[in-house]
Image (cartoon, rainbow, N blue to C red):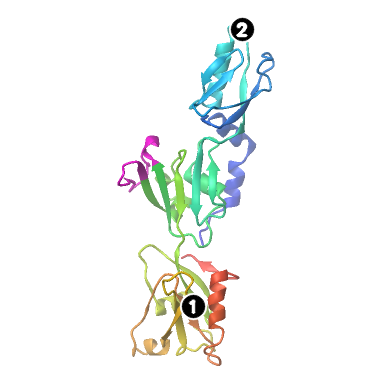
């Protein structure tokens, strides 16, 4: 499993001082809402404003001002400058109440997929942390898609899509999360789509010492013997002769088909080792009841109850 302390990251990111600092750097956009804080300008004190779809806000005394693209601090300074013709020292500050304009989508094998708000500059790791981190079934890659208007992704191997409207990068998930390559932990931009595809997994269940799901790395293939080795071999009562592969038929909702595999013959060199496909289930039955529980094991895979998924 990916070893990454999301709790520690979450605590650091959400410290009051850091959150306040990130809010000051937040760039306003359509739909955002904020409140004006001031002791001297009664027409603005405590008033809440929402940014129009065109990026403007009408302020009493200060007039119509385009705020889209301004930081919270820059807006405070702009308002203070406009009000100096009426007040010696306006002392304006702005506090965000709703963040709506700068959002990114985080989808796939994360614990809380959906829209995430960029409350100030955020790195890829920080956004993944906001999404609850990666699930156990996450694949080895993180895919980021960015609109070209925000610039191309500053990541090794980034490329444009055929339409020329998006920049796309596929990053090694472990390298990103472990900070092994800082260039891959770049700042996220509004409207980025961060996708964590589900891993290709093979399952080994039944009379083995380490039953569970084993994640395949990119371009990796596993044979029956290799999968059994990762499951740390047979239990004492296993039937090497009666093993079965439950393989998806391809049609959605159709039952898996069973393929017998005699591991004893493979070990004796009398049969060829069998390549497993993603989502295959290798079932090692008990020698006393070779056909029992196979359908129950398939159901357990579908439900996911108590199943451990291993990353290597």
- The image's mark for residue 86 is 2
Q: Tell me residue 176's x, y (percent).
A: 45, 50
Q: Tell me residue 55's x, y (percent).
A: 50, 26
Q: Is residue 295 magenta?
A: no
Tag 2's secondary structure? loop
Q: Are marks 1 and 2 in contact (CB under 8 Å)?
A: no
In front here: 86 or 295? 295
Whichever of callouts 1 and 2 sits on the residue coming sooner in the sequence is 2
- Which region of the structure is painted magenta? 147-167
Q: Tell me residue 312's x, y (percent).
A: 46, 65
Above-or-below relation of 77 to 162:
above
Q: From this viewpoint, is residue 138 visible?
A: yes
Above-or-below relation of 111 to 48:
below
- Tell me what residue is drawn at x 34 percent, y 47 percent: 156
In front here: 188 or 232? 188
| Residue 147 falls in image quadrant | top left
Circle 1 residues within 10 Å: few <14, some 14–19, many ≥20: few
Q: Is residue 161 magenta?
A: yes
Residue for badge 1? 232
For the residues labelled 1 and 2, the Cα–Cα distance comes to: 79 Å
Q: Tell me residue 168's x, y (percent).
A: 37, 47
């Amino acid at each position: 499993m990916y070893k990454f302390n999301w709790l520690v990251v979450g605590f650091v990111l959400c410290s009051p001082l850091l959150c306040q600092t990130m809010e000051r750097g937040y760039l306003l956009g359509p739909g955002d809402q904020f409140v004006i804080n001031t002791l001297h300008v009664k027409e603005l004190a405590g008033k809440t404003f929402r940014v129009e779809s065109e990026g403007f806000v009408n302020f009493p005394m200060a007039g119509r001002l385009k705020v889209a693209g301004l930081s919270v601090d820059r807006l405070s300074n702009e308002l203070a400058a406009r009000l100096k013709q009426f007040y010696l020292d306006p002392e304006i500050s702005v506090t965000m109440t709703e963040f709506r304009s700068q959002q990114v989508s985080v989808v796939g094998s994360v614990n809380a997929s959906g829209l995430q708000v960029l409350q100030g500059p955020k790195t890829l790791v920080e956004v993944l942390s906001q999404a609850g981190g990666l699930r156990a079934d996450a694949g080895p890659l993180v895919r980021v898609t960015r609109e070209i208007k925000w610039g191309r992704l500053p990541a090794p191997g980034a490329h444009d899509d055929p339409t020329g409207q998006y920049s796309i990068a596929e990053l090694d998930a472990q390298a990103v999360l472990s900070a092994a390559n800082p260039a891959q932990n770049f700042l996220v931009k509004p409207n980025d789509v961060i996708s964590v595809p589900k891993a290709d997994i093979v399952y080994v269940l039944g009379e083995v010492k380490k039953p569970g799901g084993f994640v395949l790395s990119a371009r990796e293939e596993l044979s029956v013997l290799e999968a059994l080795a990762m499951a740390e071999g047979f239990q004492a009562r296993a039937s090497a002769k009666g093993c079965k592969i439950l393989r998806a038929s391809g049609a959605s909702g159709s039952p898996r088909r069973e393929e017998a595999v005699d591991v004893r013959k493979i070990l004796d060199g009398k049969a060829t080792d069998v390549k497993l496909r993603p989502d295959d289930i290798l079932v090692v039955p008990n020698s006393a009841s070779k056909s029992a529980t196979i359908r129950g094991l398939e159901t357990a895979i579908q439900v996911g109850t108590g199943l451990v998924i291993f990353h290597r």
